[in-house]
Amino acid sequence: MILITYEAIPQADYRDRLLASGIPAWRAVDLAFIADVYAPGDLAVTPDLPRLLGRPARSLSAFLDAHRDVFLGDAAHA
């Protein structure tokens, strides 16, 4: 299982990282602003998704395994 953690960074640092990766300046500023709007509580895990799905949510790893052929095409059989 892969564990992904969220690390909040200052808006200016995020913008600079986006710019360094080649994102156009207008988009880097926009994305950094959007990311800065969310409060820490907005990132909390809630039971909403399983309730909406009517079944337990699954991990990204489980989803990718279940759809391996779609993502790899003929390479999945090699």
Image (cartoon, rainbow, N blue to C red):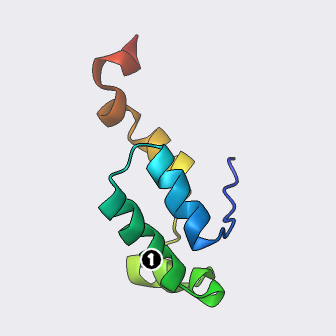
Image: 12 above or below 39 = above
- Which residue is at a point 54% across and 52% down the rendered structure image? 17
Image: 32 above or below 50 = above
User: Where is residue 20 shown, x and y percent of the image?
Assistant: 50, 45
Quarter of the figure with residue 13: bottom right
- Which residue is at a point 49% across and 74% down the rendered structure image? 35
- Which residue is at a point 66% across and 56% down the rendered structure image? 4
Image: 17 above or below 10 = above
What residue did someone put label 1 on?
Answer: 33
Asked whether, in this view, residue 3 is left or right of residue 24, the answer is: right
- Which residue is at a point 44% across and 76% down the rendered structure image? 33
* Image quadrant where one finds the C terminus: top left
User: Where is residue 43 shown, x and y percent of the image?
Assistant: 59, 80
Q: Dot 1: what SS? A: helix
Tell me which amino acid carries mark 1: Phe
How packed is label 1: few (under 14 Cα within 10 Å), some, or many (20 or more)?
some
Asked whether, in this view, residue 46 is left or right of residue 7, the answer is: left
Q: Residue furthest top?
A: 78
User: Where is residue 67 shown, x and y percent of the image?
Assistant: 38, 41
Asked whether, in this view, residue 3 is left or right of residue 77, the answer is: right
